[in-house]
Image (spheres, rainbow, N blue to C red):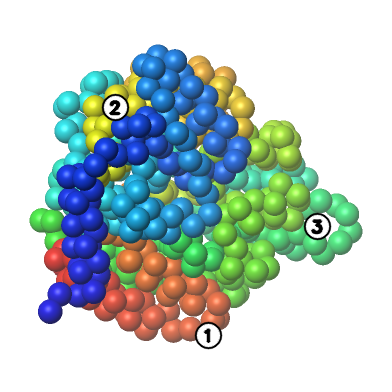
Amino acid sequence: MPAPRRIIAGLTLLLFATTACGSESKSEATGLELWTRSTPASAEVYKKVIAAYTAKTGVKVTYVPIYENFENKIQEAAAARDLPDVVINDVSLLGTGLSQGLITPVDRTGIAGSGDTLDRAWNQARAADGKYYGVPFSTQAVATFIRKDWREKLGKDVPRTWAELDALARAFQNDDPDGNGKDDTYGMLVPASTERGYTAWWASSYLWQGGGDFLTESGGRFTPAIDQPRSVEAVKWMQNLFCKDKVVVPGALTLITDDAHPFFETGKAGVYLTGPWMMGRFDKSLGKDKYEVIPSPAGPGGQGVLGEGENIYLMAGSKLQPQQKQLAEFLISAEGQRIGMNTNQPNPVVRLPVNTTVDVVAERKDERWATIKEIYRDNGRLFPQVPNWTPLRQQASETLNSIFANCGADVQAELTKLAGSFKTELAKQKAG
């Protein structure tokens, strides 16, 4: 008997087959419908990109920005046979969308401008079967943001190693870096909620820096690595931040990123591993001179960090396939990329351009973006490219969150159980 999930996937495919043979689609009457996972501020940037596309092609676009419960909205639209024509979202949609038949394959060589697109960026749109199911739109790598004014006031150097980072976080926590005479600062800001798997998003970089990993891959088959010695030691180091050094902001285990940002910009926390899209906001709210952006201090396994981005997904069931492709081609063009970068203003929807003819530093006139580019080039890593990473990411988040919450937890034992859950899920996905 097939698993319930497979039944749902099969039903979804049937729904789209029915839609494709039905009457005129909404798209044919109103033009393309585009959804993005965006805050209201970043949606304003998308509107500029879309306006330029429509002015250039005459194709109307109904734009729907969604931020909260984006994945649920996609599922609701699929159930209602009312998917948009195009979706721009991070790589998390790749596995789920493919397993449910929501996204269509992309012929990389048939995309105009593909030759100018960063070869490495295409990896974030490639599924476990080796085919592409999206067009890369933007890339990025996370970096370490540090309160420079606090560090200099305490006479500390820029941290280069985990030990130095840990010492700096403890100094921010204990040595009154803002000089107000109050015990009201914290060393490290960590958005470690299990929602959308945030715990794993944050922990992944430190796991890799510790020399560990979630999975190892050989010949297209994956094996859990989360219970191996270097992974265990890396997780113990992270647990110590919460439990031994106690340098993490209160409430971190339920924090999502939107709720976390104010801790940094209002002077509550001094170290924050986050994405470069926050620079514009922090420049305005905190002040560019108050903080610095550096590559992650090296752990025993190096400086690996999460480096991925957003893809353009051409959704199944659309009757405007030529226009889907045309919009994707505009979005990766030099013109589309430059508009999406939003010059040096906050909320860029293109962080690092995928178009190799566009120079991020020249466009933004900000050398910090050169640092981000180097981090992505030298140390950026993707999550394991299993058929569907989302359920494994959620399993990892729940286990790591529990370990950080329970200072008496047996890390080796908990990660061994997680490895068992990984094996079960990999077997379901025929990837183990």
Q: CA distance from mark 2 to mark 3?
A: 57 Å
Amino acid tagged 1: Gly
Q: Position of residue 175 (x, y in %)?
A: 78, 59
3 or 1: mark nearer the eye: 1
Looking at the rendering, in which quadrant would you find the N terminus?
bottom left
Residue that label 3 marks: 176
Tag 2 near tag 1, CB within 8 Å: no
Vertical arrangement, residue 381 with respect to residue 207, above or below: above
Residue that label 2 marks: 323
Point out the tag, 3 or 1, that comes first from the N-terminus. 3
Tag 3 near tag 1, CB within 8 Å: no
- Please name the residue shown 53% across and 54% down the image: 68
- Please name the residue shown 33% across and 76% down the image: 418
Residue that label 1 marks: 408
- Please name the residue shown 33% across and 66% down the image: 391
Point out the tag, 2 or 1, that comes first from the N-terminus. 2
Vertical arrangement, residue 279 with respect to residue 223, above or below: above
Q: Position of residue 47 (x, y in %)?
A: 52, 29
Q: CA distance from mark 3 to mark 1?
A: 29 Å
Mark yes or no: residue 122 visible. no
Amino acid tagged 2: Gln
User: Relative to the observer, which residue lies in front, 110 or 366?
Assistant: 110
- Which numbered marker is on residue 387? none
Quadrant of residue 325 within the rendered picture = top left
Circle 1 Cα neighbour tier, 10 Å, few/some/many (<14 / 14–19 / ≥20): few
